[in-house]
Amino acid sequence: MASFEDFKQQFKGDIVTQHDPTYQQALDRWAANSRRDAAVVAFVKDAEDVALAIKYARAAGLRIAIRGGGHSAAGASSSEGGLVIDLSRYLNNARVDPDKKLIYVEGGAPWKAVDHAAIKHGLAGVGGTVNHTGVGGLTVGGGYGWLSGSHGLVIDNTVQLTVVTADGSILTANETENSDLFWGVRGGGSNFGVVTEFVFKLHTQRAKVFAGPVMFSPDKCEQIAAFLDNWWPKAKPEEGMIVVMLRGPDGTPLILTFIFYNGSEEEGLKAYKELLDIGPFVNQAAEVPYEELNNMTASNPLAEWGANYYYKGVPLPQKPSDDLNPKKFNEILKHTSSPDHVFGVLLEFLPHNKINSVPADAAPFRRDLSGNTLILIQWKDDTPEKSLKAKEMAHAIASLLPTGEGYGNYTPESDALPTARAVTADKTKALFREHYPKLQAIKKKYDPDMVFNQWYTIIPA
């Protein structure tokens, strides 16, 4: 491809540069601090557009980022001075085949599109817990959701992918066709290409579920932990809970539990009776339409679009009270007194028996975790000082919690972007462990020049 003009002529979608009035809008991201001033934003209309954008970027020496939902707090969907392949404007639909219980989802769709399309047929797929998260990034990183207890990870329910690779090839990847690529993308992140379509299994789903936020004052900490210690080892596939240590808007410490039961209100009240008997000061758990489930968490102030965010993921402890106890909560509070920052320590209790029953070599994703903890710091009006303070807070909290590589989609920025090759390789090896050599071989085959390098970059073999 000789020139930018040639690229523009062949490209069917929209190309936005710094000279266009919609440029700032084209850089919009969930985490405002993950915005980067791209040289070119290419809003693709199809896989052929993606191939053209890759070829142009490589010829022009522009670093490529892929934007699906734009939800990466680490900035993986942005590229300073590079080219962004943005799937969100045109490739954002979901189409259901109710007879085969499959859903065909374009690479720029948010989970809201999946939830709403599937439930019309009495079906649902495993999806994220926040419905404005993009399907693409969450899936290629593994993908946990409220239905994981029953149906596993998103990657365990992925049956086919359409992937545009570094040389511009448009490939179908499934168990029988380009099966190595299919294996690598399901957990190996954005290392191998741009996924323009996902095909997921759907499952029969009741129209309403029992869910909602239940809030407690911190003096109930020990009682909540005792409930969790008893409940968690035998939690049913239909159940799930996220427990958050945080401060309220006025700085008052509190414990928020978001409870889920894939059943009726009667069943849900029975499942969580011992928790509710502790005496919350707010209880909004109720029977809600399934498609509203992930909207409830999406409208939480800690998930607000356009604020600044810093993430750090660590493993969930084997015993909930190891992390949720008055002593540790008080230590966390000492590190989170900044008036400019809001924090949440989210303990995700999504039953893992189904997830961990999948053979370890089925995909490059860990099958030995009991769950994930997310340290989330949010702030407004970004400055270098506030950004540094957020990182310091997150790492101080992490020092109080279990050590080890957390969920890859919860990576902080410093872990995601490639620096020295040795450092990148160390971080990536820690995430992928025994799967790393196989991923290196797949990387060498499909992306030997490391064109895709925005998330736990795999060094080709």
Image (cartoon, rainbow, N blue to C red):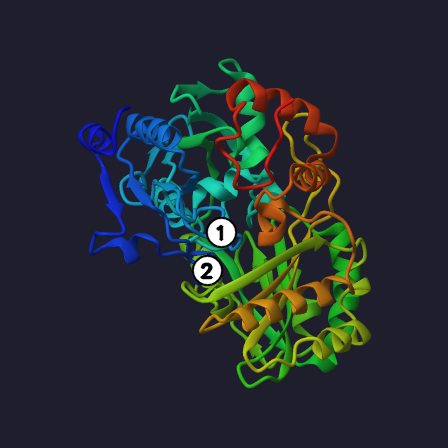
**Residue drawn at 79 percent across, 60 percent down:** 230
Asked if 452 appears above or below 25 in the picture, the reply is above
Residue displayed at 62% across by 30% down: 459
Is residue 123 in view from this perspective? no
Helix, strand or loop at disc 2? Answer: loop
Q: Residues within 10 Å of mark 1 (few under 14, many from 20)?
A: many
Q: Which part of the image, by quadrant, shows the N terminus?
A: top left
Find the residue positioned furthest to the left: 9
The picture quadrant where one finds residue 3 is top left
Q: Is residue 140 left or right of residue 44?
A: right
Q: Indicate the position of residue 211 as horizontal and vertical percent values.
A: 53, 61
13 w.r.t. 233: above or below: above
Query: Percent position (x, y) of residue 340?
Result: 54, 79
State the image quarter where residue 261 is shown. bottom right
In the picture of the structure, the residue carrying the numbered disc 1 is 75
Question: Which sits in the foreground, 334 or 230?
Answer: 334
Mark 1 touches mark 2? (CB < 8 Å):
yes
Say above or below: 47 vs 71.
above
Q: Quadrant of residue 99?
A: top left
Q: Is residue 337 above or below residue 397?
A: below
The numbered disc on residue 31 is 2
**Residue 439: percent from the left, percent from the top?**
63, 26
Hey, what amino acid is under mark 2? Ala
Query: 231 or 77, which lies in front?
Result: 77
Mark 1, mark 2: which one is toward the viewer?
Answer: 1
Lower position in the chain sequence, tag 1 or tag 2: 2
> Callout 1, which amino acid?
Gly
- In the image, is 278 to the left or to the right of 83? right
224 and 337: which is toward the camera: 337
Toward the top, the furthest residue is 176
